[in-house]
Image (cartoon, rainbow, N blue to C red):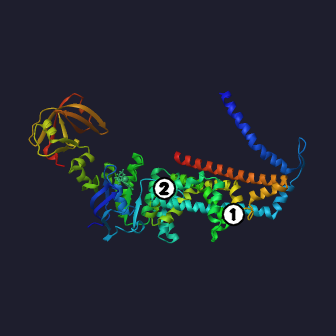
Amino acid sequence: MKEKRAAPLAVMLLVMIYLLIPLAVSIVYSLFRKWTGVLPEGFRLDNYIALFTDGEFLASVGRSIAMCIVPIAATIVIVLLALFVTTIYFPKLEKYVQIICMIPYTIQGVILSVSILSLYVGSPTFLSNRLLMLMGAYCVVILPYIYQGIRNGMRAVHMPTLIEAAEMLGASKLYAFFRVVVPNILSAIIISSLLAVGIIFGDYVLIRNLAGTSAPNMQIYLYQTMKHDSTMASAVFVIIMLTTFIITLLVLLLQNKDTKRRQQQVKE
Amino acid sequence: MGYIHFENIHKDFGQNKVLKGITMDVERGHLVTLLGPSGCGKSTLLRCLAGLEEVTSGTVSLDGKDITHVNPRDRGIGMVFQQYSLFPNMSVAQNVAFGLNMKKVPKDTISRKVAEILKIVGLEDKAEQYPNQLSGGQQQRVALARAIVTEPKVLLLDEPLSAIDAKLRRNLQVEIRRIQQDFGMTTIFVTHDQDEAMVMSDVIHLFHNGLIEQSGTPTEMYTQPVSKFAASFIGNYNILSAADFQKASGEAVDCADVAIRPEIVRINLEVADESKRFHMEGEVVNSLSHGNLMRYTILCGGVEINADIMFEKSHLLEIGQKVRLSIRKTNVILLNS
Ligand SMILES: Nc1ncnc2c1ncn2[C@@H]1O[C@H](COP(=O)(O)OP(=O)(O)OP(=O)(O)O)[C@@H](O)[C@H]1O
Ligand SMILES: [Mg+2]
C-alpha cells in the first residue's frame, strides 16, 4: 500500500517544486538587493514601497479591477436573463443556449482577438473603441464558466416551482426571479465570478492584442517593467500571483461552505 | 352555477390529451377533493384554475366572473404545492409576509397578520427560522399559512401531504380541515389517497383518464360506486364478472360486473336459508389481520371473495375450513360500465 502511494506522491512533489520555484525565486529577487552567492544579501522592501507609491502602478491595478468587474457583471446579467427566459418560456431552447455558452471554451485567445479586431477595428461607431472590444472579449471568454456556475446553482433550487409559488402570491415572473431565485443562487454566482476574475487576471494575450498599451493593466505594467528592472518585475509578479492566489482561496472556501450547507440540508 | 365553475375544459400537451371535457362545480365554502390515479390530470385541472396552465378550450369562472384568461396573480387564488414551495432565502415570517407585501399592505398590519396566522398553524415560535431548519410537516404548515394569510377566494392544495409520514399526515388532515372550516374557505384538494379524500371532503370528484368518473359525498362514493373503475378505486370492493358471480352463488344477475364490499359479507358455519340473500359455499384460503378487522379470502366455486369480519379471538377461522357466505341482495352493486 505504502509503496504504491510513494510513486505518485513523489511525482506530485516534483511538480509542486517545479511550479513553486519560479514564485519562490521571484519573491527572493524582489526582496533582496543581490543574489550572486548561495544566500541573497541586502534585504529591502524598496520595490514594494516604490510600487505602492507609483501612481501608474496603482492606476494599472485599478484598470485591472475595472476590467474584471464590468465584463463579469455584464455576463452575469446576460446569463441570468437568458436562463430566466429559457427556463420559464422556452425550455426547448435551453440546449442551444448551453451550446452557445460552451463554444468559447474551444476558442484560443489569439484567434479570438484577431477575429474581433478584423471585425470591429474599422467600424465608424463606438464598436471600434479598444477598451470596449477588450471587455467584450472578456465577456466571451468567461461566458462558459459563468454559465456553468449559474446553471448548476439553478438546478439545486427548483426554479419553476419557486416562481409559480411567488406568482400565486401576486408577484410578476421577473420580480419573482430576482427576489426569490437569484438570492438562492448567490453563492453560485459569487463562486463563478471569482473564477472569472482569476481568468481575466491571468490574461495577457487579449489585452496585449486588443488594448495594446493604450490602457495598461497589471499584466502590461509587468511586461514593461520587465524590460528595465528585473527585481521590480519580480515584485509585480509576486503581487499578481498573490492576488490570484487569494481569489482562488476565496473560491475554494466559498465552495466548501456551499457544499457543507447543501449536505446539511440533505441531512435534515 | 357554482362559486367555481369549469365548463367543458379541454387541455392538450401536444398530442397528449390530458383533460377531455371537464365540467364541474364547486360550492362556496366547500372542500372538494380531486381523487384519481397518477397522471389522470388532477394537477393539470388545478393549474388551469390557478392560471399556471392555459386551457386548450373551455371556460373557468370564479364568483360569476370568467377568469379563463386572467393573469395568475390577479385571480385571488392561493396555492400550496407538493414540495419545494417555500422560499429558502427567507425566514418563516418573511415567507408568510410575501403575499401581503405584494399587496402593499401596511407594515404593521403585515406583522400582526403574520403573527396571527403563525399562531393558527402552531408555528409562532418558528417565525425567525429558515425553511431548511423545519421538518416537512412544519414546512407545509408554513406554506399553508402563506397561502391563506392573503385571504384568497379559493385555496388550492396539490397533494400537500404526500411527502409526509402517515401519522403526521393524519394530524395535518384534521388541521387543514379545521382551518378551512373556520375560515369558510373554498378549497380544492388534490390527492390520490382515497382515505385522505374520505376524511377531508364535502364532495369528491373521482378522475379517470381526463374525465370525471363520479362525483358525490364521501358516503355516496363509498357505498354507491357507479362503475368498475370507481369500485376498484374506492373501498376494497370484491369485483366479479357476472359469470364468476353465477359460478359462486348459483344465481344469475343481469349486469356486466358485480361489486361487493367485504364488510357486508357474512360468514356462517351452518346452513341458513333466506331468499333475501345470496348464498355461497366455499373454503377459507387466506386470512389477513388488519388490526381490528380480519380479512378472509374464501374460494367459492373457483372464485375468490374477500370478507371482513370484526376480530374476535374465539371466532377465528382456519385455512381450509368450509364455510358458507351470505350477502344481502340489496347490498350487491350491479355495474354495467
Ligand atoms: N407541462 C407539461 N407538459 C407536457 N405534459 C404534461 C405537462 N404537465 C402534465 N403533463 C402530462 O399530463 C398528464 C397529467 O398530469 P397531471 O400532473 O395533471 O397528473 P396528476 O393527476 O396530477 O398525477 P399525479 O397524481 O401523479 O400528480 C400526464 O400524462 C403528464 O405527463
Ligand atoms: Mg399531480
Q: What percent of the width, then of the height, locates residue B137?
A: 45, 51
Q: Nearer the viewer, residue A147 or B234?
A: A147
| Disc 2 secondary structure class | helix
User: Is the C-beta separation of discs 1 and 2 under 8 Å?
Assistant: no
Q: Quadrant of the N terminus of chain B?
A: bottom left
Q: Residue at left 61%, top 53%?
A: A107
Query: Left or right of A212: which side holds B256?
Result: left
Where does label 1 land, which residue? A66
The chain letter under disc 1 is: A
Does residue A161 appear anywhere in the picture? no
Residue type indicated by callout 1: Ala
Query: Left or right of A8: which side holds B328?
Result: left
Residue type indicated by callout 2: Glu
Where does label 2 land, which residue? A94
The residue at label 2 has a CB less than 8 Å from ligand 1: no
Q: What percent of the width, then of the height, locates residue A229?
A: 85, 55
- The numbered mark at residue B220 is none
| Sequence order check, earlier mark of 1 and 2 | 1
Q: Residue at left 29%, top 55%?
A: B210
Q: What percent of the width, then of the height, locates residue B192?
A: 33, 50
Tell me which corner region of the image, top left, top right, bottom left or bottom right, holds residue B184: bottom left
The chain letter under disc 2 is: A
> B67 above or below B80?
below
